[in-house]
Image: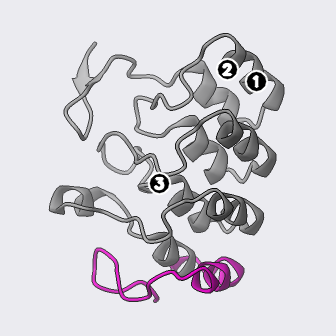
Amino acid sequence: MDTQDLYGQAVHDVLAPALYYASLGGLDRSVRLLLDKGADINAGSGIGRSALQIAAHEGHVELVEVLIKRGADVNARNQCLRGPNSGSHITALTAVSNNGHVRTVQGLLEHGSDINAGPRTLHEMTFFSGTALRAASANGHLGVVQLLLGHGADVNIDRHGFALH
């Protein structure tokens, strides 16, 4: 079944690829094996997230490093809009900031994650939660908020015009 993602590209697999599930579970050896066998490191799941995004979301810091070193795009955006089950975080940095995993946030920042990435269009604003700073502050993750501010996060941008709650 083909559907289209946010950018009009065909999404062939409504379910997630094996790499996504291995990353969700933090299964480093399985991830390495799948990548060695040619798995597309930046393929999105049917719900929009890449392997890096879900590994970051779950706080699998070592796996995030593996994925980045193997070529995962640290600024990949959620690939489709399907309501709350699409994962309302637009990037890996926003997803991990939402869950407060400081070491994983640090790793993504060290590899060039866009600290101020957020929704770009009105359509994206309907489905995505905003910036990493907003996600961290909305969930009370002070350590992540301090880290993001220390790396230059803009406190004045967000889908609602603000980042801190």
> Disc 1 vs disc 2: Cβ atoms closer than 8 Å?
yes
Horizontal and vertical percent position of residue 39: 59, 17
From the viewer's perspective, is 71 left or right of 11? right
Q: Which residues are magenta?
A: 138-165
The residue beneath circle 2 is 35
Nearer the observer, disc 3 or disc 2?
2
Q: Is 35 contained in the magenta span?
A: no
The residue beneath circle 3 is 91
Q: What's the mark number on residue 32?
A: 1
Above or below, 140 relative to 46 = below
Q: Kindly identify the amino acid type of the residue bearing the numbered disc 3.
A: Thr
Q: Is 145 contained in the magenta span?
A: yes
Horizontal and vertical percent position of residue 90: 41, 55
| Residue 45 or residue 31, whichever sits in front | 31
Label 1 vs label 3: CA separation?
22 Å
**Screen quadrant of the N terminus:** top left
Q: Kindly identify the amino acid type of the residue bearing the numbered disc 1.
A: Arg
- Of pointers 1 and 3, the one earlier in the residue sequence: 1
Horizontal and vertical percent position of residue 28: 80, 31
Label 3 vs label 2: CA separation?
21 Å
Using a 10 Å C-alpha cutoff, classify the residue at mark 2 as few (fewer than 14 neighbours), some (14 to 19) or many (20 or more): some
Residue at horizontal 70%, vertical 39%?
69
Residue at horizontal 55%, vertical 49%?
74
Q: Circle 2 sits in a helix, a strand or a loop, which is it?
A: helix
Label 1 vs label 2: CA separation?
5 Å
Residue at horizontal 71%, vertical 66%?
106
Above or below, 42 relative to 91 = above
Q: Circle 1 sits in a helix, a strand or a loop, which is it?
A: helix
